[in-house]
Amino acid sequence: MVKPSFMNLPDEKKRVDRFFNPRSVAVIGSFREGYFGGYVMVRSLLKAGYGGAIFPVNPGYREVLGIRVSPSLREIPGPADVAVVMINARSVPSILTQCADSGIRSVVVVSDGFAERDAEGARLQAEMVSLARRLGLRIIGPNTAGVVNTANGFNPCPYEAGYDTIPQGVTAICAQSGMVNPQAVTYPDMRFGVSKVCDFGNTCDVDSCDMLDYLAEDGETGVISMYLESVRDGRRFLDSARRAAARKPVLILKSGKTGEGARASESHTGSLAVDDRIFDGVCSQAGILRLERFRDIFEMPKVFASQELPSGNRVGILTVTGGVAVMAIDEFLRQGLSLARLGDAESESLEAIFKGMGKNPVDMGPMMAAVPNGFDLYPKMLDTIIQDENVDALFAVLWANPAGNILSRYVETFEELKDRCRKPVAIWIYGPDAGVTAALGERLEQFGFPVFDTPEKCIRALGLACRFAGQAARGAPCASSR
Amino acid sequence: MVKPSFMNLPDEKKRVDRFFNPRSVAVIGSFREGYFGGYVMVRSLLKAGYGGAIFPVNPGYREVLGIRVSPSLREIPGPADVAVVMINARSVPSILTQCADSGIRSVVVVSDGFAERDAEGARLQAEMVSLARRLGLRIIGPNTAGVVNTANGFNPCPYEAGYDTIPQGVTAICAQSGMVNPQAVTYPDMRFGVSKVCDFGNTCDVDSCDMLDYLAEDGETGVISMYLESVRDGRRFLDSARRAAARKPVLILKSGKTGEGARASESHTGSLAVDDRIFDGVCSQAGILRLERFRDIFEMPKVFASQELPSGNRVGILTVTGGVAVMAIDEFLRQGLSLARLGDAESESLEAIFKGMGKNPVDMGPMMAAVPNGFDLYPKMLDTIIQDENVDALFAVLWANPAGNILSRYVETFEELKDRCRKPVAIWIYGPDAGVTAALGERLEQFGFPVFDTPEKCIRALGLACRFAGQAARGAPCASSR
């Protein structure tokens, strides 16, 4: 993967980049131990292995975790690229002035009590914005849990997360909510990893458009996943989204669809939600892939993280249970997929293995019950389907049972397939033992095959891959991250 | 809970009951070790603690797991209430005759290769059905993974499941698929447990109507959850469903909605799917609650398993993160729920705890960041909302973080609430550590509060509770299982 180079980026993108690649960071807050605040943030940075300088600032402390605390920004022992602010909202404007005086031009305002709180907070936020404009500062937040860059260990998480590092991967996750930050997500369990995380919070300055512009050109990021409640400038959003979606998959979950949801959004981040039908139209025009459920933000990017894009929408199904195939096919229509019709040679080859198996969905259930060690034939069955030129993508349903050699056959088969597979695969594993199911899933994801915990998610993921591939085929340059 | 009495049940229901409460069972199949067959089935029965007599039958074996194998049904050492058949499809008719000769009138046909396979199999199935009618037999299957009754350990599972027993509970789970049988489901992890499991398979005789009739009067069952691909007799189904739904919640997931799905269903269980719009109408008329996703079959019944029904559709939200509340409220409309408006006293009381917290959704995020040990106030906040007469149900969003006393506060609060809570609660727990999240969920479910793994599932579950309560309030007798 090519490392990002910002030498040729316009200035504003360089300034967004500073939030993720600072050489040094000033941490302004309380350093009392607890589950929130400056103490936790400094520890997060140390544990994640951030190599830049950390400058804690607070007149009431002398030292935190072995690092000297400066009484004020004026007295930090070197220049800081970024400040992270966790103090009382009313004191934030004066801190912004001090930041500017100290040469800091990128500020993450974690503090809350702004537009999401009340009219007084909204006034304070407006004051902060106009001050930032005057001083030439860029702000992420307020009311944000901040950012993460897995490439350099810059993880200034203000909340206790309990783990040290997030696996590095190609997915960037952004949200108008701290629900994507380390304290809220079991990132160490996400085997495909992430590149960057950003919570816009109240989005008083840096917003989804800035991040789309930045991430579109970020060499560490292969797929962008976002949760939004609102969009400020529809025209600019359409432009940014279209440019980003032409380069890599952009997946967006948007809430605030209903009137009540929109009002709740207002009191959450002080944002006014956009009419959902308008947003839908913008997504279609821009080539954005809309997500349906909260967990989709984290899970759907997997289908893009390490696989080729499909050449069409014809899905082959290899399953141990016919019932799930019936359910899956129902979901096909909604996701723009179709049931592949196997080629004659492939059909005959499968029929020869067991009567009735020569049609899609290929249900190996009856064979499994009738043929002792029937799983020995698994590699041949899978290969027959995946090599069929009438099949563009595969939905594989695996029964995780420790009996016999079932598990090892799956592992061998997918390990052998991993380097020569040119079609996306989505895997659902079911079985009587959650631990066995999870362990098998982990092995297969290590080979680059995404495993989902429901059959519906597999179909949604293949549907997204197919839609993005379709857009790419219609002329937009396609940037599969493989 | 009242034990079932079938003394006053019509004969056909008694005969369905025999499948679940046999005093003895004949197991006809192979007793070779493996992941499928008679050996596994006998071991399943022994491990589940089935107290009735087990009569393995096969001329090629003398003993299995310490039990004598009889060479034929004629030679089993006592009368059998049920036979479970796992032999070649073509031999099944002659076994049915032997069953009748031996006084067995209830037969589970696990064997496949019938209508789901081809025309020859369909002919064989028709022959089996007419034979059963003539001999006065009732059949579950063919092509079924059978039944389970957790009350008596009758668990003749033909596939290796790896665990011994399924926790006993009030949910009956039926399907036209073996996807609900022990080998496919992590039942030991389901803390609300199940009463009975039934896979209809090809449904040549005992069908969803028989099971609805039976389970409606089953004292062990408080909620019925079903997966169907097809319905044979719409009129009878409407009658049975209406009677069952008047007594207890009946939740149904139906697939085969699309033309392709319906065709796949035909080759899965040899059934012809019913038009989905017609089925939707039948559900509305009968008071059936339709499910949306596969996992719903297992998870949605939890909301009914140990909680009161709501008096209305007004939901209170107590959350650590505002973003999820916004998403949840979007889902309200689809599920027929509304955002509760808190009473004045309750609103003032919450506002006094922290500015801005006096409105629903009650977002304790800002308080949590600002007030050290803010979680000490959790019991008071939860109680204020749950006692508010303007709130009919609660969606609680918990941040599972091991720091400080957060986890213990949750546990104390819900433990204290459990015996006096008269409103349904649905809980979503998020956090950075999957193990901690799971452990907290387990504690809260032990208190009878259902925990779901996505916010959307919480809202769906409360929506179902609300719809069932609405039906009950409109005149149908309501049988909450508490």
Image (cartoon, coloured by chain):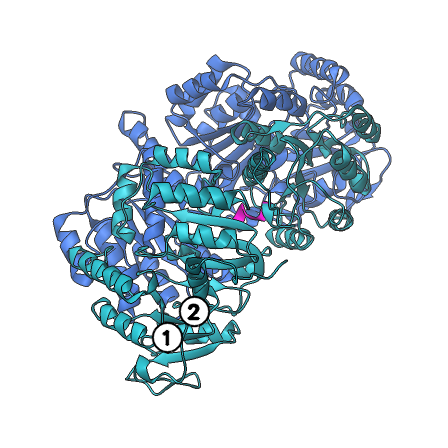
Chain colours: A blue, B cyan
* Residue name at image x 38 percent, y 62 percent: B145
* Span shown in magenta: B299-303
Quadrant of residue A117 within the rendered picture: top right
Please state which amino acid type lies under the numbered disc 1: Val
* Residue name at image x 48 percent, y 57 percent: A438
- Other-residue count near label 2 (Cα within 10 Å), few / some / many at <14 / 14–19 / ≥20: many
Q: Residue furthest right?
A: A60
Relative to the observer, which residue lies in front, B307 or A292? Answer: B307
Mark 1 or mark 2: which comes first in sequence?
Answer: 1
Element marked by disc 2: loop
Mark seen at residue B27: 1
Marks 1 and 2, Cα distance to the nearest angstrom? 9 Å
Residue A360: x and y in percent read 23, 48
Q: Mark 2 falls within which chain?
A: B
Relative to the observer, which residue lies in front, B234 or B313? Answer: B234
Mark 1–mark 2 CB contact (< 8 Å): yes
> Where A320 sits versus B466, above or below?
below
Residue at label 2?
A: B156
Q: Main secondary structure of the magenta part?
A: helix
